[in-house]
Amino acid sequence: MKILTFGTSNSKNSINKKLAFYAAQQIHNADISLIDINDFEMPIYSEDREKKSGIPQLAHDFYNAIGEANSIVMSFAEYNGSYTSAYKNLFDWTSRIDRKIFQNKPVLMLSTSPGSKGAQSVLAAAKASAPFFAANVIAAISLPNFYDNVDAKTGVVTNETFNQSLFEAIDKL
């Protein structure tokens, strides 16, 4: 099973990218494609830019990466209660190719933050909008207090409640 995995932050040390990768590693016999959204940086989307220059190749590359996967594991970073601008821009450009960005793939949505809310606001927004973008959300799981719940040396999540929810979700893939 080919799993496309990414965090929605452009931070080089993204805790959400780490969480998404951890989750994907729990899937038996997975062929994991871990991408960095920094590799898909494009000008800020605008209708004028699209009319002038078309849709950037990087948006097509991201859309094709989704298409080549059997499932998607993504983890949302939350900036000021919403999506990161890096992810939102990638999402906006890619949606111009096809509004059904997720192409009816099973999607495991995660989120984490250093705080006690675990980026629940952005996770809830992403889950609520998912049907409009052809995402078959199998689960949406938040991990609060990342640094208290992940072993810094191994990257292993130590929060048993999260892990139980994760393994239940993986069984649905």
Image (spheres, rainbow, N blue to C red):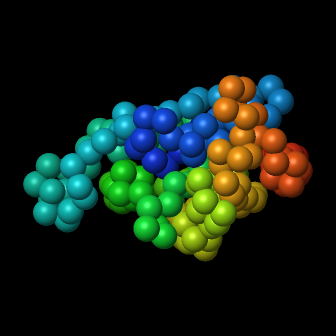
Q: Is residue 21 above or below residue 112?
A: above
Residue closer to the observer: 92 or 85: 85
Residue at 74% x, 46% y is: 149
Q: Position of residue 83 (x, y in %)?
A: 45, 62
Residue closer to the observer: 38 or 118: 118
Residue closer to the observer: 29 or 16: 16
Residue 166 in view (yes/no): yes
Q: Position of residue 112 (x, y in %)?
A: 62, 54
Q: Is residue 131 above or below residue 68?
A: below
**In terms of image quadrants, where is residue 22?**
top right
Residue at 14% x, 49% y is: 53
Q: Position of residue 85 (x, y in %)?
A: 35, 57
Q: In this rendering, would 20 be left or right of 89?
A: right
Residue 1 in view (yes/no): no
Q: Is residue 105 above or below residue 28?
A: below
Q: Is residue 155 above or below residue 97?
A: above
Q: In this rendering, would 154 be left or right of 93?
A: right
